[in-house]
Image: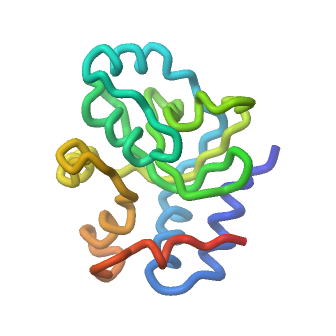
Amino acid sequence: MGRIVVNYVEELSRITHGPAKRMYEYIKERGRYFEGAMSSSVLHRALLASVFFRPRLKECYFNAQMLALVSGFRNIEYYEGIASWLAPTTHAWNVYRGRVIDLTWENLPDVKLERLQYYGVPIPLEFVRKNNPIKRRAAEMLLIRYLEEIGYIQKLGGNRYPYILVYL
């Protein structure tokens, strides 16, 4: 199986402009590729027991941020980038001991965890904590905001999403 998500990011970095182009270039320069995801059964049970959290479909940012912040497991990383199940899309997931944990997609019908592809960058937990999804009871993509904070792209202000959603 080819690296669909890597090719997708390379193409987006070529055809987009402005902040979106810089975001995809950042993923190309610093991104990490993963193929396959592991079951989160052990982590998931502990998370459910500790905070009564139930992952929700179509809420990858919330699910991954919650796992990173409240699971109590050390070495869980929060990632954002591009992932592919049926087609490449912006997505958030966690990495634990070098393996992907995807609470959002792992329980979809007919999903084969070993066939999922991910290409993205870690976002420091301090930054995720500062943009606390628990207090807001919602979560959003943090990558653009993080790139603004570290000076990789200019501050956009307002709605960041029109720069991100590009479909081929």
Give the number of marks: 0
Q: On screen, 50 above or below 58?
A: above
Q: Residue at x 32, y 81 (%)?
A: 156
Q: Nearer the viewer, residue 27 or 109?
A: 109
**Residue 81 location in percent, x, y?**
51, 56
Q: In which quadrant of the rendered image does the N terminus lie?
A: top right
The quarter of the displayed image where residue 109 is located: top right
Structure colour scheme? rainbow
**Residue 17 location in percent, x, y?**
54, 86
Q: Residue at x 22, y 54 (%)?
A: 131
Q: Nearer the viewer, residue 32 or 53?
A: 53
Q: In the displayed structure, does residue 119 sit left or right of residue 150?
A: right
The quarter of the displayed image where residue 108 is located: top right
Q: Residue at x 67, y 56 (%)?
A: 88
Which residue ends up furthest to the right in the rendered image? Answer: 1
Q: Nearer the viewer, residue 70 or 9?
A: 70
Q: Residue at x 67, y 30 (%)?
A: 113
The quarter of the displayed image where residue 151 is located: bottom left
